[in-house]
Image (cartoon, grey):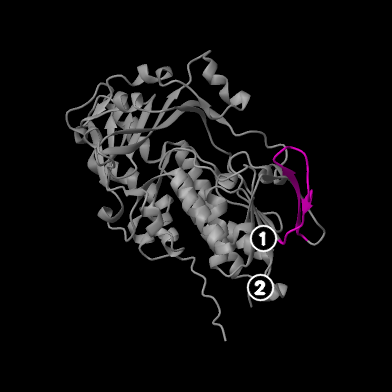
């Protein structure tokens, strides 16, 4: 017996948040046979925004199972190689990625806006335009005697208009690192902790000849740069869209160090603010300063995450994505794990008669693994090889294997791939989250 027959009707499931986690959850629930799904998003519209991200093969596998791979690849680039560099220019390691590493699915570099547009378009096409409600946010949650959640709603103006509350059968908090749903479930937790690092992000469009075909991560024990192309060359100038992200400790007494305290998390700043720290950074022909100077805009963020929770689920309310397990941006796993969360949640709900049991089963599978990944990212995840190389050879090296043996480098990468479940053996087993729907007639 399924959740549908236990209710005698399809339950009403509300998803708070229309980002990657929320939209993928809606599509996953629809694919599992749930008909009454509503996504409420605080923004007035789903607009293109953000910078680039990488999707690991396990996430691409799940998006393929949802029938989205062709649309996604139309605006993405298959990541074929990842290279780590010492800030002096020395190559630490190079790893094949995606199909080249033996996966059945590629790793994709993609602009966040393109991914979100593909997801939102699919939600509207499959669930109907009414399933995605913008300009409304969930501002509070309280349990009802029967275990269902009562949601407090706020409309875009800040005033409550129309329905001030809602009582769905299930609530999924997909409302990000500063989740109102999480705050209601864990009052008094406070804001996300800051590790003292600042992150600058942006997108540049540069000639294809000035950017390698690989993804690079470079730096030392204090600062890093991540650079990768996100598409094929276009236009008469054969230009490529390039994502970049930089990280460095905040200067003592610097006004930028107060961004977290002000809540000013995506502050636009001139490139000149941080460009001097990266002068001279060049890696196999990729000149980081040239890429930064080509950016239309740049944004500054504090590097924050969330403390692992000992509980995501309360009755018929649970969390997915950053609301559940926001992690430091190492290892390219934020969006990836949000997508896997969504699929796991829909699968668990479809296989249990009682929604609370379904949510508990989802948490039992996902929370321990995500807690381990959060902690691994605090230890720099796979990027620990950069700190290791700098520690042993701060002024550079001629041959990295004289400094860090190949076996040690491979072990770091292998452990992290296993922790994130994107190692080839795991991925190539296929999606564990397919829900066979009952035959009609």
Decide: marks 2, 1 in contact (CB < 8 A)?
no
- Estimate the x, y position of residue 92 in percent, counting from the top left: 25, 35
Location of the C terminus by quadrant is bottom right
| Label ID, residue 4 | 2
Residue ranking furthest to the bottom: 441
Q: Circle 2 sits in a helix, a strand or a loop, which is it?
A: helix
- Estimate the x, y position of residue 404 in percent, counting from the top left: 25, 35
Location of the N terminus by quadrant is bottom right
The residue closer to the viewer here, 180 or 243, is 243
What segment carries the magenta color? 147-169
Q: Quadrant of residue 135?
A: top right
- In the image, residue 324 lies in the stretch drawn in magenta: no
Q: Residue at x 36, y 55 (%)?
A: 423
Q: Residue at x 21, y 30 (%)?
A: 285
Query: Of callouts 2 and 1, which one flags the residue occurring earlier in the amino acid sequence?
Result: 2
- Estimate the x, y position of residue 125 in percent, counting from the top left: 53, 61
State how far apart marks 2 and 1 are (Cα): 12 Å
Q: Residue at x 63, y 70 (%)?
A: 352
| Label ID, residue 343 | none
Q: Residue at x 68, y 68 (%)?
A: 354
Residue ranking furthest to the left: 398
- In the image, residue 164 lies in the stretch drawn in magenta: yes
| Label ID, residue 13 | 1
The residue closer to the viewer here, 53 or 268, is 268
Label 2 crowding class (10 Å Cα cut-off): few <14, some 14-19, many 20+? many
Q: Circle 1 sits in a helix, a strand or a loop, which is it?
A: strand
User: Along the horizontal axis of the image, is 436 left or right of 143?
Assistant: left
Q: Eyeballing the image, is 157 above or below 291? A: below
Q: Quadrant of residue 396?
A: top left
């Amino acid at each position: 017996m399924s959740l549908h027959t236990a209710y005698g009707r399809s339950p009403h499931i509300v998803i708070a948040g229309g980002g990657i986690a929320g939209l993928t959850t809606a599509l996953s629930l629809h694919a599992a046979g749930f008909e009454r799904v509503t996504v409420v998003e605080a923004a007035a519209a789903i607009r293109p925004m953000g910078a680039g991200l990488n999707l690991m093969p396990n996430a691409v596998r799940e998006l393929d199972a949802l029938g989205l791979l062709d649309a996604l690849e139309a605006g993405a680039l298959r990541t074929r190689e990842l290279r780590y560099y010492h800030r002096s220019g020395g190559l630490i390691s190079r790893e094949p990625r995606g199909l080249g590493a033996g996966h059945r699915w590629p790793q994709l570099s993609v602009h966040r806006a393109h991914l979100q547009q593909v997801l939102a378009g699919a939600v509207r096409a499959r669930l109907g335009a009414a399933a995605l409600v913008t300009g409304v946010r969930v501002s509070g949650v309280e349990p009802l005697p029967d275990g269902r959640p009562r949601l407090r709603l706020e409309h875009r103006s800040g005033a409550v208009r129309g329905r001030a509350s809602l009582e769905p059968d299930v609530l999924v908090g997909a409302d990000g690192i500063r989740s109102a749903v999480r705050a209601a479930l864990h009052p008094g937790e406070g804001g996300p902790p800051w590790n003292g690092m600042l992150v600058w992000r942006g997108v540049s469009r540069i000639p294809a000849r000035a950017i390698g075909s690989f993804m690079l991560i470079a730096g030392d024990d204090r600062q890093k740069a991540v650079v990768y192309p996100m598409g094929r060359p276009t236009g008469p100038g054969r230009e490529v869209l390039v994502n970049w992200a930089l990280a460095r400790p905040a200067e003592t007494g610097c006004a930028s160090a107060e961004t977290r305290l002000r809540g000013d998390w995506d502050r636009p700043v001139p490139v000149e603010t941080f460009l001097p720290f990266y002068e001279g950074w060049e890696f196999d022909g990729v000149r980081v300063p040239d890429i930064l100077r080509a950016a239309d805009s740049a944004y500054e963020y504090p590097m924050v995450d969330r403390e692992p929770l000992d509980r995501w689920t309360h009755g018929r309310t649970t969390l997915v994505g950053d609301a559940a397990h926001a992690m430091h941006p190492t290892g390219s796993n934020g969006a990836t794990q949000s997508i896997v969360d969504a699929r796991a949640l829909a699968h668990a709900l479809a296989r249990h008669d009682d929604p609370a049991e379904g949510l508990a089963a989802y948490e039992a599978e996902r929370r321990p693994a995500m807690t381990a990944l959060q902690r691994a990212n605090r230890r720099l995840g796979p990027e620990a090889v950069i700190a290791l190389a700098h520690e042993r050879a701060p002024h550079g090296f001629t041959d990295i294997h004289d400094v860090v043996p190949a076996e040690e480098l491979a072990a770091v990468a292998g452990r992290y791939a296993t922790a994130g479940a994107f190692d080839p053996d795991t991925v190539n087993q296929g999606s564990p989250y397919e829900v066979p729907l009952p035959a009609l007639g």
